Image (tube, helix red, strand yellow):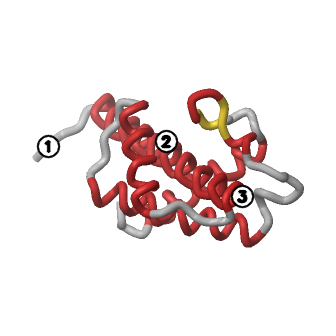
Amino acid sequence: MMMYGRRGRNDMAGRRIHRLETNAELLCFLTLSEIFAFRTTGAWLQSDHLVESTRIWLRRHDHHADWRRRIELSRMATDLAQQLVKAGDIARGQPDASWFFIRDMQINFASPRVIVVYARCVAALSRDISGGAA
């Protein structure tokens, strides 16, 4: 029987929280990228652009994700972006979406609208985890 000390459980919980935060930030980046593309070109990102955006983000943040998780997050980002644009939750009154990012395509967490997107990403991932798909 494997016993976990207090630290063992805390370490596991800490890793789960870190993984959720990392996935939420990547999902937020991809969702914002989708919205940005739609607002600036009128078209959603193509699959190869999502794949490349994911690789760039992971490399820039020194994180890793298996290919299944990357595909899953890309699909979730597309769905979330389309829902947010359709509902008018994000782009209302904004002629462009340049406020999503700061230098070097870093997420602009100072923007209240970006925080809305991030919260939706956390909620979507939390549902995903509780549904057993994590």
Q: Quadrant of residue 115?
A: top right
**Residue at the left extreme of this rendering:** 1
* Rendered image: mark on residue 39: 3
* Rendered image: mark on residue 2: 1
Frontmost residue, 101 versus 121: 101
Residue drawn at (63%, 69%), measured in percent from left and top? 82
Disc 3 residue type (three-letter): Arg
Q: CA distance from mark 2 to mark 1?
A: 28 Å
* Rendered image: mark on residue 50: none
Disc 1 residue type (three-letter): Met
Q: Quadrant of residue 10?
A: top left
- Of the 4 image quadrants, the one containing the C terminus is bottom left
Disc 2 residue type (three-letter): Glu
| Crowding at mark 3 (Cα within 10 Å: few <14, some 14-19, many 20+) | some
> Is residue 117 positioned above or below 80 on the image?
above
* Place of residue 100 in the rendered image (x, y in percent of width and height, measured from the top left): 69, 42
Frontmost residue, 45 versus 4: 45
Location of mark 2 (residue): 21
* Place of residue 59 in the rendered image (x, y in percent of width and height, measured from the top left): 36, 34
Whichever of callouts 3 and 2 sits on the residue coming sooner in the sequence is 2
